[in-house]
Image (cartoon, grey):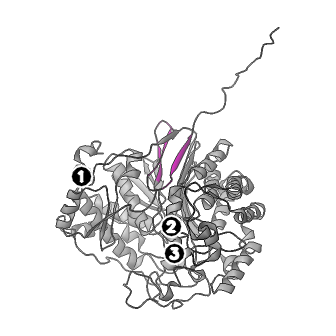
Amino acid sequence: MAKDWRSRAGTPFACQKQTASGSRGMVVSNHPLASAAGAEMLAAGGNAIDAAIATLFTLTVVEPMMVGLIGGGMAHIRLADGSHRVIDGQSTVPLAVRGDTFRSKPGSAHDVFDTVDDENLTGPKAVATPGSLKAWCETLRRFGTMSLADVMQPAIKHASRGFAVTPYLHECISDAAREMLKDKPIAARYLPDGKPLQVGDRLVQADYAETLTQIARDGEAALYGGPLGDILADYMQAKGGFIGRDDLRAYKVVERQPVRGKYRGFDILGPPPPAASGVHIVQMLNILEGYDLGAMGFGTPATIHLLAEVLKIAFADRAAATADPDFVRVPVERLTSKAYADERRAAIDQSRAQAWSAGVRQLEGAHTTHMTVADGDGNVVATTQTINNLFGAKILIPGLGMVPNNYLNLFDPRPGHALSLAPGKRVTTSMSPMMALRDGKLVYALGLPGGKRIFPSAMQALVNLIDHGMSLQEAVEAPRVWTEGNALEVEQAVPDSIRAALRAMGHDVLPVAAVAGGMNAIQFHADGTLSGAACWRADGTPIGLAGGLARAGVRFTLERRP
């Protein structure tokens, strides 16, 4: 493992945050109040699952632009017995939607899913059947130790009394303002008097606090077949949306086994289809294993060029063959095999950029949040949750206080493709709650938000840790790159000289402020301690639990003085 990556770095950088350490638990999320909610559960004697669910509910309050109960997600859980499972709470296509329900915008590229009037992007017609709430409640019942009412208390508290708007939330509201102003309920909340909430303003969500209180009492049944579901279905019917009561009653959470791969002595585990992440991270690492990236250096033209080429390969294969496995037979074994990696690697030109087409086919038959939690007993949760785009469908459901997803924008409006619409089909996602083991012991758990840029960024973090020998904090904060075949996005920290060298190799280089969102991660040390790290791209905050109860037999006596 390369330990002196700085001496060969083409892109030097400085970290802006610090790690946290602990021995009894660690919670890392993209908002300090959410991390504190999870830490509170650990301090009260709960396990990592209790802490994760408390964190997620609180994130729906303090990160409403990223995650909500009318959304979906993936959770990667490692239990204390060493077993792994992926809980798929992804949203599904409503039963009333067909492959030709939307009309593709004339002239749209094959990989652009824009529709006439943006019906699949904003408004009620963009909303898919939610899975988040049911997945969280089922996960808590199966693997947690605390009651739903207990883990929801922090979220209810912050919704009812309010919290201070951060610069990050203010920027997100500003970015989405134009579309949100078209919907009076969401505009009233986030754009009072037509202007975005300012930094430091108190955001109170009393109606959502009432919704959360009802869920704490009645569980997921309140939405899936209960009065909250009636409100949602009636709203959709009145506004031309597709979700009906039958969609909510029929929704099922699915447990899956993670995809596994090997990279330089590490076992890499991630979500299987319909997530694209586990398959294509393993695929890319298999290709990169044929190069000495440590010797090539971090952020050098040679290293970035290879990253760009494997990203283009992965995205070409993803577009051709990765989707809901109930509808498309995804060639997982082929994509994750070392032999397939050898074939693709052999076609890479290390001196020139090139276009790539898919090497596999179907076997016929973007804004998110992430959090990572570990307790002192070996239970670990890495989970990514989303309402898809910033503020989802850009509407708010009166009577619920919830912002719904716009997941239907992730489906191809043209029939006959891997990602085409079909009733009940689950969303294909780039969510990457990843874990890396060595000799059977967990070493890293990480993930991040960011749409199509998620799994490429997670892959780069693993390369940073394994090949470049970075610390956890360095790995999550390091400058990233991304492409799916067109422009090569590079974060602005990549120097001009590196960009020029990449252009000379044929890359269309596009400097950007950030590639994907705020990564958070936990490292598990051999002595049993934990490190937690979050990066500068969001309000990420690690909180470690250390210390413990008093030593047995300790007594304190008070002497009575005369």
Using residue 367 as the reference point, say whether residue 344 is left or right of it.
left
Q: Is label 1 in a helix, a strand or a loop?
A: loop
Name the image quarter holding the N terminus.
Answer: top left
> Which amino acid type corresponds to the residue marked 2 in the rendered image?
Ser
Q: Residue at x 65, y 54 (%)?
A: 54
Q: Closer to the camera, 106 or 468?
A: 106
Residue 401 in view of the camera = yes
Q: Earlier in the sequence, mark 3 or mark 1?
A: 1
* Residue 369 seen by the camera: no
Q: Amino acid at mark 1?
A: Gly
Q: Residue at x 51, y 71 (%)?
A: 176
Residue 10, numbered label: 1
Between the residue at mark 3 and the residue at mark 2, the CA separation in whole angstroms equals: 8 Å
Please state the horizontal and vertical placement of residue 369, each as a whole percent of the image: 52, 61
In the rendered image, which quarter is residue 125 located in? bottom right
Left or right of 158, for residue 358? left
